[in-house]
Amino acid sequence: MAEEILGLVWLLGILLALLSIPALAGGSVVLAMLSAPRDRRTPVKGGRLLWGAVLALLGLSVMARVAWATRAERSYGELEPALYMLAGVVGGLLLLLGLGPFVSWTLTLPARFAARLPRPSRLPARWLAAHQPGTAGGVAMTMVATGAATAVMITAVAQIAQDRAYYHPQAPYGALVVEVASDEEAKAVRAILRQEIPSAPIVQSEDTVKGQLTYYYDDMSWMDLHIGDQALLRYLTGDPSTPYDEGTAVLVTSEHVGVTPMSITYSLGGSSGGTLSRTIPAITVEPADPRRSDLFVPAKVVRDLGVGLEPNRLIIDPAFHRTSVAEQDRLDRRLGDGMTGYVERGFEASTGWLFIFGPMILVALAGALAATGSVADSLRWRRVLLRVTGGSGVRLRSYAACRTWLAATCGTALGVAAGSVTGLLLALPRTAQSGWDSLPRVAFDIPWLPVAALAVGFPVLAAALAALLPVGSRPPITGGYGRPPSRSA
């Protein structure tokens, strides 16, 4: 009963955490709007900034606690890394929520140096200092989106470095492998391979179908077992001159192991039952890929033991033919949904994080453009702009671009700073290992150059987009909230 209650509490906690993610993200925008004064001469309330600082410190504390809990290089439970990661994400959003009131304060900074800015940037700087709630809300949206994008990018780099370090190739580089489950499937796949790749010889690997087979060789039982003929051995080693003997096992590994006989333990099943063993000679050869370790046992040895065999893989040796992507696609269509051909192409970094990074950039762009006000205001202040610019469309677009650039810069600066801290703290739970294996973490290069490119390039992208939009649809640029700009601006 106690375990059921604990499981229910865990489930409710996970649901609340998942529901809090959009609430916290939207709360940062709402808090920024509520903290924005109605007049540019009115500062942001100190109480709002204090509460924001408390929330930000709370978020940092949660992420620091999660990072500390997952610092050890050990095997965690199946759900532990995911739960820690979820808690860390909530902490990161609390940090962004706490930065909401600081958005309005950040918008006043360009106006303090307006006299030193280029002339097209002076009016936009003073307009931002008007602390319009809509402007603060749009900039906060940019902050949240760029912060999430930065954190996702850093954690993805950490995970990719971990995956690359412990990547174990499933076959020699360039090999085509098709899994089969019976003689009938093997015949059908062999016919398809003959049609699609007629010039390449087909190598067959086999598995036990009657009885069981295990092996022990100098504590190297973690090797992948392959049963077959001479063609299979040469495929594993990548060397046609590899010696082959029907009664000798071959360890294809770069590990330094002694050459001693190998013990095979097997059972035939049925009423006779019992476990039997046999010792056969063994040699060691170097593999083509030093990361692979395979054990080859001749099929004749296994059949002589009375253990039945059937095909389990059909292979195109890369020494005779390198399967192209187009050939693999055609083969997959021919094989249907039940079977697929796998081609070993080495480690390929996951690009799934881009499905989060891309939408976040779009949301950030929407926030930067929305931060400039409303269309109704643009009608009221267009006369002022026409007097200042002399009716020049180029100058109108330059004002629009400068204002969007300043708004995007304010939001991006806060977002990238918060996202960098969040990403570095979440890298530990992101790379925590679940399962039996306890793999040590590897160092990764923090992507400071892409982060800097995001911080500098995103405001430029937003400004360029604002300049390309029709001028009539752009929101206004004013010298103050409800007051025309002065000539001296």
Image (cartoon, rainbow, N blue to C red):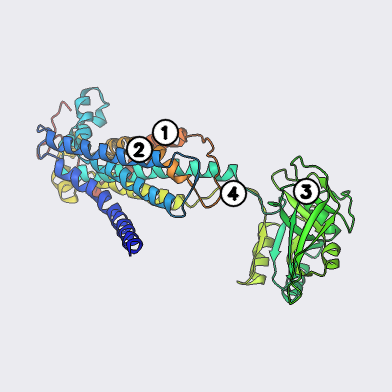
Q: Which of the 4 quarters of the picture holds residue 387? A: top left
- Crowding around mark 1 (Cα neighbors within 10 Å: few <14, some 14 to 19, many 20+) is few
Separation (CA) of disc 2 from disc 1: 24 Å
Nearer-the-camera pick, 313 or 474: 313
Q: Is residue 185 above or below residue 15?
A: below
Q: Secondary structure at mark 3?
A: strand
Separation (CA) of disc 3 from disc 4: 25 Å
Q: Earlier in the sequence, mark 2 or mark 1?
A: 2
The reply to whether the C-beta atoms of the residues labelled 1 and 3 are less than 8 Å apart is: no
Q: Position of residue 445 (x, y in %)?
A: 51, 34
Quarter containing the N terminus? bottom left
Which label sits on residue 14? none
Q: Residue at x 15, y 34 (%)?
A: 479
Q: Earlier in the sequence, mark 3 or mark 4?
A: 3
Question: Of tags 2 and 1, which is closer to the observer?
Answer: 2
Question: Of tags 1 and 3, which is closer to the observer?
Answer: 3
Which label sits on residue 64? 2
Q: Position of residue 319 (x, y in %)?
A: 80, 52
Q: Earlier in the sequence, mark 1 or mark 3?
A: 3
Question: Of tags 2 and 4, which is closer to the observer?
Answer: 2
Separation (CA) of disc 4 from disc 1: 25 Å
Q: Secondary structure at mark 2?
A: helix
- Three-letter amino acid code of the residue under disc 4: Glu
Nearer-the-camera pick, 258 or 367: 258
- Crowding around mark 2 (Cα neighbors within 10 Å: few <14, some 14 to 19, many 20+) is some
- Three-letter amino acid code of the residue under disc 2: Ala
- Three-letter amino acid code of the residue under disc 1: Ala
Which label sits on residue 452? 1
The reply to whether the C-beta atoms of the residues labelled 4 and 1 are less than 8 Å apart is: no
Which label sits on residue 348? 4
Q: Position of residue 6 (x, y in %)?
A: 33, 59
Quarter containing the C terminus? top left
